[in-house]
Amino acid sequence: MTVAALSAGVSRDALVARLAQVACVSGPFALTDGQMLDSYFDEYRLAADPVLLGDVVDAMTALVPEDAEVLAGIELGGVPLVVALSAATGLPAAFLRREPKTYGSKRQVEGAAVEGRRMVLVDDVVRSGVQLLNVARMLRITGAAVVGALCVLERPLGGRLLLDEHGISLGSLLTEADLPASRTTP
């Protein structure tokens, strides 16, 4: 699933062009596994542009499953997206850490209650899907029903298939193929 709906006056092509211009950055970037990229999708540049963030969220609202009860943003890239998406949809937001906090509340999940609720995970980019699957497993242990995931950009590295194998449907605003070829990498 790709761009399903856009706010009035914003075409799909215009949104893709603005995302490519603002958030697709040339330059070295290290992934958590040590792999180096020549360019990357910078979710912070997206989040720092209030007009672009609003247009992205307007388009993403159409991807939120009707039966979703809580939107859950994964640190750190998913947090600004889930805050804006929560405001746009009226659904409560939860904030997920990869690991429990070692001080203070020592929580891994903050914000809205998740136990017994239908959750949709929100992140900036999905590659292999492993990060989303790990968070989904943690939430399921707490009693949440993780039914879907949303992202701005889906890279073709198996994430959709992995999530589907675990009962999590993935809605992506864009795929790598939607971006100009000269600006994309895994």
Image (cartoon, rainbow, N blue to C red):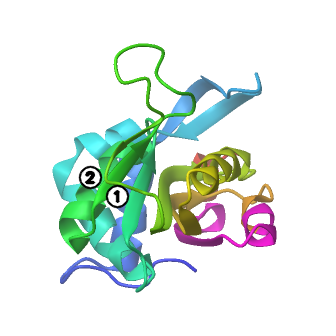
Percent of width and height locating residue 158: 80, 59
Q: Is residue 125 above or below residue 39?
A: below
Contact flag, marks 2 and 1 (Cβ < 8 Å) = no
Position of the N terminus, as image quadrant, is bottom right
Q: Amino acid at mark 2?
A: Val
Q: Is residue 120 above or below residue 59?
A: above
The residue stretch that appears in magenta: 161-178
Residue at horizontal 77 percent and vertical 27 percent from the top:
35
Q: Image quadrant of residue 165? A: bottom right
Residue at horizontal 40 percent and vertical 86 percent from the top:
66
Q: Is residue 80 above or below residue 177?
A: above
The stretch drawn in magenta includes residue 175: yes
Residue that label 2 marks: 83
The stretch drawn in magenta includes residue 148: no
Alpha carbon distance from label 2 to label 1? 21 Å
Residue at horizontal 19 percent and vertical 63 percent from the top:
87
| Residue 18 disc label | 1
Q: Residues within 10 Å of mark 1 (few under 14, many from 20)?
A: some
Q: Residue furthest top?
A: 103
Identify the secondary structure beneath mark 1. helix
Earlier in the chain: of badge 2 and badge 1, it is 1
In the image shown, does 90 or 56 lie closer to the viewer?
A: 90
Q: Amino acid at mark 1?
A: Arg
Percent of width and height locating residue 185: 68, 45
In the image shown, does 136 or 21 lie closer to the viewer?
A: 136
In the image shown, does 34 or 116 lie closer to the viewer?
A: 116
Percent of width and height locating residue 147: 58, 72
Give the side of residue 107 with respect to residue 171, left or right: left
Task: Report if residue 174 is visible in the image.
Answer: no
Task: Report if residue 145 is visible in the image.
Answer: yes
User: Which label lies toward us, 2 or 1?
Assistant: 2
